[in-house]
Image: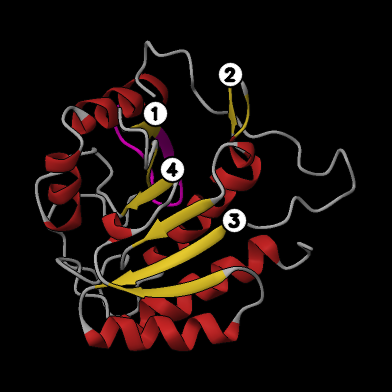
Amino acid sequence: MTADSGTHTDREDAGTSGLAPGTPELVLCAVDEPLADAWTTAAKSVAGRVRVHRGSVLDIAAQAVVSPANSYGWMRGGIDAVYARAFPGIEQSVRSEILAFHGGELPIGEAVLVPTGEAQPAWLISAPTMREPGEVLPADTVHPYLAARAVFLQWRDGRLDHGPVRKFVDTIAMPGLGTGVGGVEPATCARQVAAAWDEVFRHAR
């Protein structure tokens, strides 16, 4: 969604129906063994459709991929640079969305959804794990939890002009959150993502 696309998402009241909306399929992706092992442990600890893929996030037949971005939407390093090469113009779309709806800085714990311009994945969910590009996160950071929670809330409560996000996104592919430049230990990231999943979807069925 760019500022001019007319597809800005808003949170709908998830409590109006009295029914849990279920869960997406979450594919936890890793290109290295430490993260893959941590993801595997996390996947076993949660209920719902969660699985691990050893390989690129772009290998997955997903409707949405997660960008563990910075608050300003710059996509110059790590997996974000991969996305920028795969989806020309995606960085500008993310930055335009952040400028239009968040004053140019997307807080940690929030997420935006933008179209990739491709048939699959059709959407990119930008959820910052750090404020500044290249920031090394402290050992006690909770940013992976906050970013994952923002992604899951975007799926559960977000709306496009033509309907709820969850009606158009069934599978989300997620790379490590903060485990690259951010320096977060894989096990820390995995535990926090699992905790966010449990918080958002604990009543899903």
Q: Is residue 129 above or below residue 170?
A: below
Amino acid carrying mark 3 in the image: Pro
* Residue annotated with mark 3: 24
Q: Earlier in the sequence, mark 2 or mark 3?
A: 3
- Image quarter where the N terminus lies is top left
* Residue annotated with mark 2: 161
In this rendering, which labeled residue sits more in front, label 4 or label 1? 4
Amino acid carrying mark 2 in the image: Asp
Q: CA distance from mark 4 to mark 3?
A: 16 Å
* Residue annotated with mark 1: 102
Q: Earlier in the sequence, mark 2 or mark 1?
A: 1
Q: CA distance from mark 4 to mark 1?
A: 10 Å
Q: What residue sits 42% from the left and 75% below the top?
A: 52
In this rendering, which labeled residue sits more in front, label 2 or label 1? 2
State the extent of the magenta-drawn residues as a range.
104-113
Q: What residue sits 20% from the left and 36% below the top?
A: 87
In this rendering, which labeled residue sits more in front, label 2 or label 4? 2
Residue 67 place in picture, x, y as percent:
31, 50
Q: CA distance from mark 2 to mark 4?
A: 17 Å
Q: Secondary structure at mark 4?
A: loop
* Residue annotated with mark 4: 111
In this rendering, which labeled residue sits more in front, label 4 or label 3? 3
Image side of residue 92 versus residue 126, left or right: left
Q: Secondary structure at mark 1?
A: helix
